[in-house]
Amino acid sequence: MNIDEKLAKVCKGFCIPGTYISYELIQVGNVNKTYRVKVLLPEGREKSFLVQNLNTYVFKHPVQVMDNIDKVTEHIRAKHPNDIAIHFHHTADRKTYIEDGDDFWRMCNFIPSTTFNVVNDLNVVRNAGRAFGAFQMDLSDFDSKLLFETIPNFHNTAKRFDALEQTVNADPMKMVSSVQEELQYLFSVREMACRLTKLQEEGKLPLRVTHNDTKINNVLFNTDTGDAIAVIDLDTVMPGLVGHDFGDAIRFAANYTEEDCPEIQKVGVNMDVFQAFTEGFLEKTAKTLTPMEIDTLALSAFVLTVELAVRFLDDYIQGSPYFKTNYPEHNLVRTRCQIALAKDMEKNMEKMEQIVKNCASAMK
Ligand code: GN1
Ligand code: MG
């Protein structure tokens, strides 16, 4: 079956009235495949939907992913019944997914909006901070025991380092000798990068329900006003630390470049973006966070950047089975970009800490 036939079958399976017309591949996201699908409705109008093929190499239990999303979106919807939100279509037997051979499909409404891979508009950045902060606060009364851990130890930085060590020892593609410099840097910052994991294990940082994949392109913005419309990509909503969301968002949004920029001399933390995101995020969360959570926010940006470098490099050494790549060295380029960013964060750590402190006291 070709992709048009598959997508037409998916539309039918989700009981969409009308006929499938065409699709457009959406080039966002490093694991799942996303299509914007056009359907001709019976009344003659065209309508877009979003169809996704979930990556089951990454998500070993995709039904659990959908179950989590259902519960979380219902919880949020109950608090904001009038907000625009993602909702998934159901099959005739009320499932939010279709399993067809190796394919795992889901389908939701298409929300006209703008997304960003790089942002310079500080208003947009502040709104992204507010959106992720509000998302976490909306889930502060959600019982985390109801959630499956869709990817165990997802942000356990120490385990990510252990995994890299194992891959290096196995060296399945004989690539380790070519990445010595990268390995050397990463292992030199291992202790600092594992501080969040350690504090969590010592019970010094509370577990919350977190998004865990807070790239700014996971926020949909109103094209005219720059206001955030919705937080999307709830595949990894799980118990986690506030710093996982804050840190990953900074890693992505506050970098001058995209996360796979090959020109590493351009990579670095944009402190204005750091400040704007922090203002928005703390506006929503400062009153709830513990002093230790606030004190470790700046560190978390470094931690998440190193963690991603470790994951990209681990995947590269294995021949890139996990992340989607556009060319063979893609994961190496991503690794180098994250390392350059981590180095710049080390240099700016005191400034970042000061900004967090100032914003937190202003918001309390
Ligand atoms: C993956 O698929 P996407 O782009 O939402 C990854 C994140 C990484 C990100 C790096 C489940 O997210 O953890 O931060 O790539 N998601 C998963 O771009 O591994
Ligand atoms: Mg994701």
Image (spheres, rainbow, N blue to C red):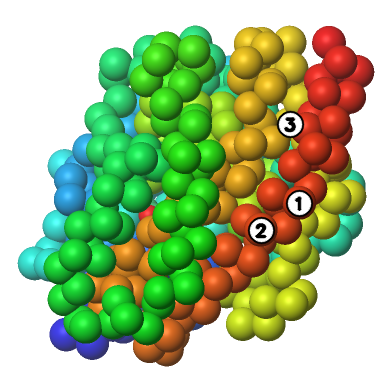
Q: Secondary structure at mark 2?
A: helix
Q: Amino acid at mark 3?
A: Phe
- Vertical order, 86 against 174 (above or below): above
Residue 343, which numbered label?
A: 2
The crowd level at tag 3 (other Cα within 10 Å; few <14, some 14-19, many 20+) is: many
Residue that appears at 85% across and 61% down: 120
Residue that appears at 30% across and 58% down: 164
Report the image quarter containing ligand 1. bottom left
Q: Is residue 328 visible?
A: yes
Q: Position of residue 89 (x, y in %)?
A: 36, 48
Residue 347, which numbered label?
A: 1
Q: Amino acid at mark 1?
A: Lys
Asked if disc 2 and disc 1 are in contact, CB closer than 8 Å, the reply is: yes
Q: Position of residue 208 (x, y in %)?
A: 47, 20
**Split into 4 quadrants, where in the image is the N terminus?**
bottom left
Residue that appears at 45% across and 46% down: 190
Residue at the limit of the structure toward the left, as seen here: 101
Q: CA distance from mark 3 to mark 1?
A: 23 Å
Residue 281, which numbered label?
A: 3
Q: Secondary structure at mark 3?
A: helix
